[in-house]
Image: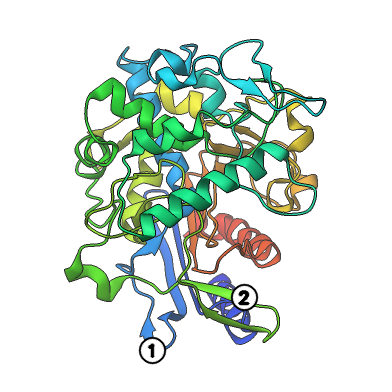
Amino acid sequence: MYNYQQAIDHIMQQEVEAGNIAGAGYMLIQGGKQRYFSTCGYADREKKTPIKRDTIFRLFSMTKPITAAATMLLVERGELDLRDPVSQYIPSFREQTVWNPGGEPQPVVRETTVYDLLNMTSGIPYPENWEGCSPSGLMMDDLFQKLKADQAEGQRLTTREWIDRIARVPLAFQPGERWMYGLSADVLGAVIEVVTGRRYGEFLREEIFTPLEMVDTAFYVPEDKLWRFAQNYNWNEEKKALEIYTGCNLGEYYGPDVSFESGGAGLVSTMEDYSHFAQMLLQGGSYNGVRILSEKTVQFMHQDRLSLSQKDAFLWDSNLGCGYGCLMRVLVDQGKAGTIGSLGEYGWDGWTGNYMTIDPADDMVMLYFIQRCGYSSTTALRRIRNVTYGALSRLEER
């Protein structure tokens, strides 16, 4: 007899046995109840430490939905306007320029806004260094190499100091012209610091993490929790095997003296903690009787905000069939996505492979957490998603 739980476990086991990942965790919450939780493999393969509910993972870009929620919290309080220019809060964003293939950088036609940041249409690139990448990305990479070298030598620049330097790099295109994945969420973290007068991590702890009982979510890992901190792995193409990754990709640093609190990639969390945040969004802004956001705000957050021209660059395999808004994908075409998921399903993933699905139509949250650099495991994820959706009607019949 078919058993969806065995099917989920089989897919995860295949990934581990193939050597693609060291371990994985899966969680399905539907109708306000945990329907299934399962783990496979190791959080630390060398120490034989299994993945558990309280294993601490690097979120990387799974930080972004939290930053979107924090931004919208200030919007609904009237402390921030979506159409505000970023320079209103961070003066270094005044008189920005756009890279010009014909010579000197050109001035911006209009200023970058908070709304641009939320939708990744700001033109602010990530650091890039690969054939065909944008010249702005190369310039950003030069900056990050210097910033990371200074950090490795003990220099602790604040979030604002990092962002002030980022603001000086020419944009890849005019604000609003198209979609481009980049440092927009990091800039939002700095904007929130200015608006609230608090460090970004402090604001998140007081306004989101503590109310949602996210006890292990932060920008650093305390010494007494390091034993629960999952190892991060990278694929060695020459050896055709995973190896421990000790590098620094985007300035991530998890020590207690962390000073750059990256709104786009800096948080750590557990599956248990992150499920509280995801359920808050699923339940229209509240969790366990505690309201974080209004229903109207959450409705705003999971709508496609990209125009057809902006979507020309939104072509990643993991986001086919999706639109984008508030730092998250939104499913708009099941066929292109290769999924039986409901239209309007939304969520995001991270550089180390963590993945979230929130589906209002099916009252469902699905989480899949791993730790491998640059691995989206798209095929395995599509299989896991389709198995999950195929099981929902069976769960409802119980």
Q: Secondary structure at mark 2?
A: strand
**Can you give x and y, in whole percent of width and height, for residue 307 in the image?**
72, 22
Q: Is residue 231 visible?
A: yes
227 versus 117 height, above or below: below
**Can you give x and y, in whole percent of width and height, for residue 155 in the image?**
31, 51
Q: Is residue 2 visible?
A: no
Q: Residue at x 31, y 14 (%)?
A: 79
322 versus 113 height, above or below: below
Report the amino acid beneath label 1: Lys
Which mark is drawn over residue 347? none
Mark 1 Cα within 10 Å, few/some/many (few <14, many 20+)?
Answer: few
Which mark is drawn over residue 235? 2
**Left or right of residue 341, residue 165 in this image:** left
- C-alpha distance separating marks 1 and 2: 19 Å
Report the amino acid beneath label 2: Trp
**Can you give x and y, in whole percent of width and height, for residue 327 in the image?**
53, 36
The residue singled out by tag 1 in the image is 48
Quadrant of the rendered structure where residue 97 is?
A: top right
